[in-house]
């Protein structure tokens, strides 16, 4: 009987303590705060399970130069502001985000080991609590696939795509 009372008390007490903690104003919610206990584990586990269940497994286009170049253009216009450009430090916008967005064109953050379908799912749907928006309302399916295929092949891009992703060269006006 004591066991059952203890179990019921525990089932009621734990949610009440969690709610009181959240209502107390002590929960870390600012972008500069460290994550709550188990926050990363819970979010990552749920995200990976959802992506695995919902990501496409077949590609509607080839990873040829035209696709990679088109993907580079989409990346430059819609992704680089947070995820950075080729051979460039992280953009200032990325420095204030929590968690910081991966710099997808830098060797240490490349997603070349991820299948394009996973990258496509993330670009299309976004990722809650990370600042990563979903682009399904602003990019076409072809554009989403182009950028996903580009990122899955970021370590072996043709020169044309690398040039599209390179930092803009400032124009020099001649001195008079």
Image (cartoon, rainbow, N blue to C red):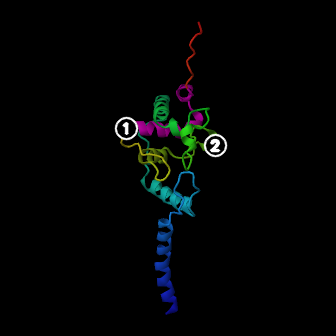
Q: Is residue 32 above or below residue 137?
A: below
| Secondary element at tag 2 | helix
Q: Is residue 176 left or right of residue 72?
A: right
Q: Furthest-bottom residue in view? A: 1
Q: Are marks 2 and 1 in contact (CB under 8 Å)?
A: no
Say if the magenta span includes residue 149: yes
Residue at screen point 45% across, 57% down: 50
Pointer 2 local density, CA inside 10 Å: few below 14, some 14–19, many at least 20: few
- The magenta span reads 143-167
Say if the magenta span includes residue 19: no
Mark 1 = which residue?
Answer: 140
Q: Is residue 110 left or right of residue 49?
A: right
Who comes first in sequence, dot 2 or dot 1? 2
Residue at screen point 53% across, 57% down: 44
Alpha-carbon distance for marks 2 and 1? 29 Å
Closer to us: 78 or 45: 78
Closer to us: 25 or 54: 25
Q: Is residue 44 above or below residue 169?
A: below
Residue at screen point 45% across, 44% down: 123
Where is residue 65 drawn, in percent x and y?
50, 29
Disc number placed over residue 108 in the picture, else none: 2
Q: Is residue 15 above or below residue 25?
A: below
Query: Looking at the magenta stretch, what is its main secondary structure?
Result: helix
Q: Furthest-front residue in view? A: 24
């Amino acid at each position: 009987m004591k066991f059952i009372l203890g179990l019921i008390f525990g089932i009621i007490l734990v949610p009440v303590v969690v709610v009181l903690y959240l209502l107390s104003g002590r929960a870390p919610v600012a972008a500069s705060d460290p994550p709550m206990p188990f926050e990363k584990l819970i979010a990552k586990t749920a995200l990976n399970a959802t992506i695995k269940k919902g990501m496409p497994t077949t590609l509607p286009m080839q990873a040829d130069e035209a696709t990679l170049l088109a993907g580079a253009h989409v990346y430059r216009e819609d992704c680089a502001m947070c995820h950075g450009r080729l051979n460039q430090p992280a953009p200032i916008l990325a420095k204030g985000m929590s968690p910081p967005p991966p710099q997808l064109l830098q060797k240490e953050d490349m997603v070349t080991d991820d299948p394009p379908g996973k990258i496509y799912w993330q670009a299309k749907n976004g990722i809650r609590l990370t600042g990563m928006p979903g682009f399904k309302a602003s990019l076409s399916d072809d554009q989403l696939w182009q950028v996903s295929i580009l990122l899955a092949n970021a370590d072996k891009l043709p020169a044309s795509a690398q040039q599209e992703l390179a930092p803009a060269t400032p124009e020099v006006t001649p001195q008079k």
